Amino acid sequence: MFDALSRWRQRRVLQRSAIPDALWREAVALLPFLAILTDEELARLRAMVVLFLDAKAIVGARGHDVTPLQRVVIAIQACVLVLNLDLSHYGGFENIIVYPGEFVPGWEWEDEAGVVHRNDGPLAGEAMPGGPIVLSWPDVEAGADWENTGMNLVIHEFAHKIDMRDGKANGCPPLPAAMSVAAWRAALTAAYDDFCARVDRDEDTAIDPYAAESPAEFFAVLSEVFFADPELLRDEYPDVYAQLAALYRQDPAPRAARLRRE
Ligand SMILES: [Zn+2]
């Protein structure tokens, strides 16, 4: 009964809130890494984006006006991660807050001595367990130009959300039953240790050195690379690539290679 009802509701949302063709095409054109998707996958992505936008509020802060194109660009990148999974991976929060630039998070934390600290460094993005995702629009825009910026903020923050489904951001998201936690940890830990050593040696890494910050950041940054530059991840850390391919149920590297040769 519930399933039938929710399917009926989904159909209604898809009909009522369809994205106009011109807007969809404009948003897809801004995200070159979508070029590997088939027409069937793009159609599925488009339906998922409609359901995502129905379930989440994307709101501007500090005077930022979120345009329809910005909403779709953010939603597409969020949905790419779960294209072969489902939107339940993004349960437990409703809001995506968009700032006109980097922002200073308002949260405070208490250390073991009971001293309350404020984090005053400006951030481009933030994801907290059970809380909203916060994004700086210029940094979202920069992600469309992967060739030059090597970053994708939306994929990064939504990967944190997937990691946090068990309440903790630790670089080990809840895995489907078919995957081995031991194999995940072995692949990620070996790659993380290697990457940290390279960063410590001041090596010029093709992957953003910010990934060395913590295992949680390593997972989020490598998820960006997995979707935006899959061949790079497969070449640098093939075992991590294989784990992410199993987690996201996508294998983008051979498709990106084929596309590049065409
Ligand atoms: Zn992060």
Image: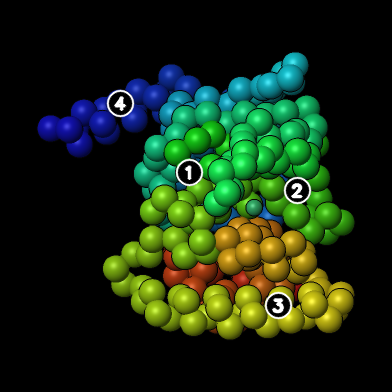
Task: Locate residue 154 relative to residue 262 in the image: left or right.
Answer: left
* Mark 1 residue element: loop
Indicate which label's residue lies in the foreground, 1 or 4: 1
Q: Is residue 226 visible?
A: no
**Spatial CA span between label 1 and label 3:** 26 Å
Q: Position of residue 114 (x, y in %)?
A: 56, 43
**Spatial CA span between label 1 and label 4:** 28 Å
Q: Amino acid at mark 1?
A: Pro
First of labels 3, 2 by sequence position = 2
| Residue bearing the label numbered 4 | 9
| Residue bearing the label numbered 1 | 129
Other-residue count near label 1 (Cα within 10 Å), few / some / many at <14 / 14–19 / ≥20: some
- Dot 2 beta carbon under 8 Å from ligand 1: no
**Spatial CA span between label 3 and label 4:** 46 Å
**Spatial CA span between label 2 and label 4:** 33 Å
Which residue does the image show at 12% across and 32% down from the upper left? 1
Cβ–Cβ below 8 Å for labels 3 and 2? no
Q: Amino acid at mark 2?
A: Gly
First of labels 1, 2 by sequence position = 1
Task: Locate residue 177 relative to residue 231 in the image: left or right.
Answer: left
First of labels 1, 3 by sequence position = 1
Q: Amino acid at mark 3?
A: Phe
Which residue is nearer to you in this view: 143 or 220? 220
| Residue bearing the label numbered 3 | 195
First of labels 3, 4 by sequence position = 4
Q: Is residue 192 visible?
A: yes
